[in-house]
């Protein structure tokens, strides 16, 4: 079945470091891909999305490119801030009501 | 609009008791979803409503679980005869109806259930 695999955390970085969180997927169709973020004490929020191959989603300095050839959707940010500390979830939807999430990657950013 | 609201935020119950959770979606959203999230895992789909119609239930949703959305607005999720394995965060999400399924889903803060 469809699935999402993302790198295990926690990831600990110093402020202004470069961030990459890897995400790969398995899907029978052509999914839309998402990154959701969960800040401490808050609900999941959509961070960015991409709906077709080679699309780049971006928001708040984060970006991810839909790579069909490698079935990947890695999240990147050039310079992280303490306020980026959160849990990040990669997810996919193949055109139905069900969104499939990865296990999440916790990010800690130190000042 | 204050977003998706869930009540209660926390629930501790004894094994064998029944519990009910409520979700109030964003008012103009026709689609409503329930997910379950256990520690260290991502959310897992439980069920989906379009207006008042429950259109899909996951196999994760045993016969002890029932969800309703009687007037197409708020929804309830009931768990009967709770078991320790039911301990999890129960998330509700809503989204506006549209042609595409890549429309953003808005999540509530969840109800954390602990079965002792």
Image (spheres, rainbow, N blue to C red):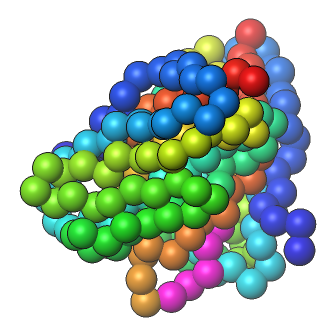
Q: Position of residue A31 (x, y in %)?
A: 27, 65
Q: Is residue B62 visible?
A: no
Q: Position of residue A106 (x, y in %)?
A: 57, 27
Q: Quadrant of the N terminus of chain B?
A: bottom right
Q: Quadrant of the C terminus of chain B?
A: top right
Q: Nearer the viewer, residue B105 or A56?
A: A56
The image shows residue B108, relative to residue B110, as above or below, that is below
* Residue occupying image coordinates x 33% and y 41%: A23
Q: Can you tell which quarter of the image residue A97 is in?
A: bottom left
Along the horizontal axis of the image, is B113 left or right of B100?
right
Tell me if residue A49 is in the magenta stretch.
no
- Number of numbered tags placed on the structure image: 0
The image shows residue A12, relative to residue B69, as above or below, that is above
Q: Is residue B5 visible?
A: yes
Q: Position of residue B78 (x, y in %)?
A: 70, 44
* Residue occupying image coordinates x 24% and y 49%: A72
Magenta region = B93-98
Q: Residue furthest top?
A: B116
Q: Nearer the viewer, residue B77 or A67?
A: A67
* Residue occupying image coordinates x 78% and y 15%: B14
Q: Nearer the viewer, residue A104 or B54?
A: A104
Q: Position of residue B40 (x, y in %)?
A: 53, 22
The image shows residue B48, relative to residue A12, as above or below, that is below
* Residue occupying image coordinates x 10% and y 56%: A69
Along the horizontal axis of the image, is B7 left or right of B100?
right
Q: Residue furthest bottom?
A: B99
Q: Can you tell which quarter of the image residue B105 is in?
A: bottom right
Q: Residue furthest left?
A: A69
Along the horizontal axis of the image, is B25 left or right of B46?
right
């Amino acid at each position: 079945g469809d699935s999402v695999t993302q790198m295990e955390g926690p990831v600990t970085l110093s402020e202004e470091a470069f961030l990459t969180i890897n995400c790969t997927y398995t899907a029978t169709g052509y999914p839309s891909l998402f990154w959701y973020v969960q800040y401490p004490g808050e609900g999941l929020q959509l961070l960015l999305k991409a709906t077709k191959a080679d699309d780049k989603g971006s928001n708040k300095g984060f970006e991810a490119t839909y790579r069909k050839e490698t079935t990947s959707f890695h999240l990147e940010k050039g310079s992280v801030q303490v306020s980026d500390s959160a849990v990040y979830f990669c997810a996919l939807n193949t055109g139905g009501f069900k969104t499939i999430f990865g296990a999440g990657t916790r990010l800690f950013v130190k000042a | 609009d204050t977003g998706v609201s869930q009540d209660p935020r926390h629930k501790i119950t004894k094994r064998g008791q029944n519990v009910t959770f409520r979700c109030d979606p964003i008012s103009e959203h026709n689609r409503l979803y329930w997910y379950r999230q256990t520690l260290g895992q991502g959310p897992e789909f439980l069920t989906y409503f379009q207006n008042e119609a429950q259109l899909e239930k996951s196999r994760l949703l045993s016969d002890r679980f029932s969800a309703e959305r009687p007037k197409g607005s708020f929804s309830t999720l009931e768990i009967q005869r709770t078991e320790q394995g039911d301990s999890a965060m129960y998330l509700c999400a809503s989204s506006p109806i549209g042609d595409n399924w890549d429309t953003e889903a808005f999540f509530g803060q969840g109800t954390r259930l602990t079965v002792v």
